[in-house]
Amino acid sequence: MSESKSDIQATTKEQTSNYRSVFKATSLFGGVQVYQILIGIIRSKVIAVLLGPAGMGIQGLYQSTLDLIKSVTALGLEQSAVRDISEANGSKNEHLIARTVAVTRRLIWLTGMTGLLLTLVLSPWLSTLTFGNHDYTWGFVILSSTLLFNQICSGQKVLLQGLRRLKDLAKTTAIGSTIGLLVSIPLYYWIGVKGIVPTMVLTSVAMLLLSWHYSRKVKIEEVKVTTREAISEGRSMMKMGIAMSVSGILVALSAYVLRWFIRQQGGVEEVGLFTAGFIIVSTYIGMIFSAMSTDYYPRLAAVNKDNSRCREIINQQAEVAILISSPIIVFGMVFMPFIIRLIYSESFLPANHYILIALLGMMFKVVSWSVSFVFLAKAESRLFMINETITNLYGLAFNLLGYWLGGLAGLGISYAAMYFIYMIQVYIIARKRYGFGFSLSFKRVYGILFLMVIACFALIVAWQSAWVYLPSIVILAGCSFYSFYELNKRMQVMQYVKQRFKRDV
């Protein structure tokens, strides 16, 4: 009997530790995400004031062109390599870890050099295609170096992420964003538009040095790998990476087609309203998805061969994600008009029609993302590509139809509908393929929080009056209290805080 009791206590302790790990990662990278958003807002303001709309356009065109080249040449290694390093790390085999890291580094160099050389060769054509003349050829020649620097930097970050050096990874991201801002202000002030290229290069170098500084702290045995060995041993890594790259290209293509359609039907101003709304929705809950891709993915990849452990980790992640995101979603629904005025201006308030409904869709997106990461963790590249291709196709169809029938509000409905179907889709696939199922604990928590979110949404839509804030704030308080209660039950937050306080005293 005593043994059984001790086993239960050990299991409970392990579950508490797992929940705390998920919460810490979400908090850590959620904070980094918020910080990056603030830095991005300041940088946009600086560019707008010092360079004007033309300067902002030049910087954006340079960046989007380089991003497109990287998406083609990088082979998605910054995502797919995380899985291989995490799996090697989970095995505790030091030689396997060192070998996997060596293969990754060799492939990172190869793809980085490919991006550099391709940009160099195509620089006159890129200038003509992007800007309509040859005046920016030397700009692309100089910026070609950033393809190599950024790819090597990505490789160092992959190492930190795969080995779960999360604090070092967070520091690299946060400090790098700060340096980028500090470098840009004096250069833009002194030489204006001519400072765009030097700023991009110096920021890239700073990120490379930072990532190298933190990654060299990781002690790994030296293993020599030839190019032929790297390509041979990294075939599955590249295969998964290419699948993820194709998915990224499809997302970018769908976004382009949708914006083109909105411009054709509603004009440039409507495109601006949708873009502003989409940025708010994607970054507002971005902290949850940032934590998923940074901490959750390597944890799931480390146990990808054990379906039982995968099911346990997915349910834990889904519970914590929904408990954290639900109060944020309700807060956004209640106070979004004030947030829009703060970030943009009064003229952007029509975007709230899209944002309000899209926030409801976030309740489906959080769950679907929690489940869909299992395809990446298990390196099911073909399944992942088919699943994402189908989703992008019906997602684009929903968006085009939604805007045609209902304008910005129709886009919000299509967003929510797409993620509702996607949630069911990935659940069915994971259940049939890996025996996945949601725990009773998750179903109970999700059901209660979903009812609260729906109640708040219905109130705001139906009651067009300032008085709606009273019951909405009551729902927000109830949602926040319930989420904290459930988080505390899983992670013993209050007990942890009291222990830390006593230790500090």
Image (spheres, rainbow, N blue to C red):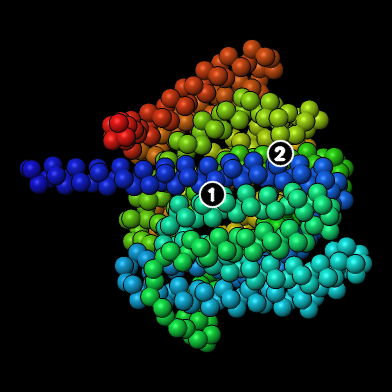
Numbered badge on residue 244: none
Q: Name the residue under label 2.
A: 277
Indicate the amino acid at tag 1.
Ser
- Quadrant assignment for the C terminus: top left
Indicate the amino acid at tag 2.
Gly
Q: Where does the image place residue 270, in percent across and percent down from the top left?
A: 82, 40
In the foreground, 95 or 14: 95
In the foreground, 181 or 389: 181
At a point 41% along the width and 78% down the height, the residue shown is: 222
Q: In this view, does 103 lie above or below 293?
A: below
Q: Mark 1 points at which residue?
A: 290
> What residue occupies the far right of the structure in this picture?
133
For marks 2 and 1, the one nearer the N-term is 2
* Residue 336 sits in quarter: top right
- Counting other residues with Cα less than 10 Å from the Cα at mark 2, is it few (<14), some (14-19), or many (20 or more)? many
Q: Where does the image place residue 27, in percent across and percent down from the top left?
A: 47, 42
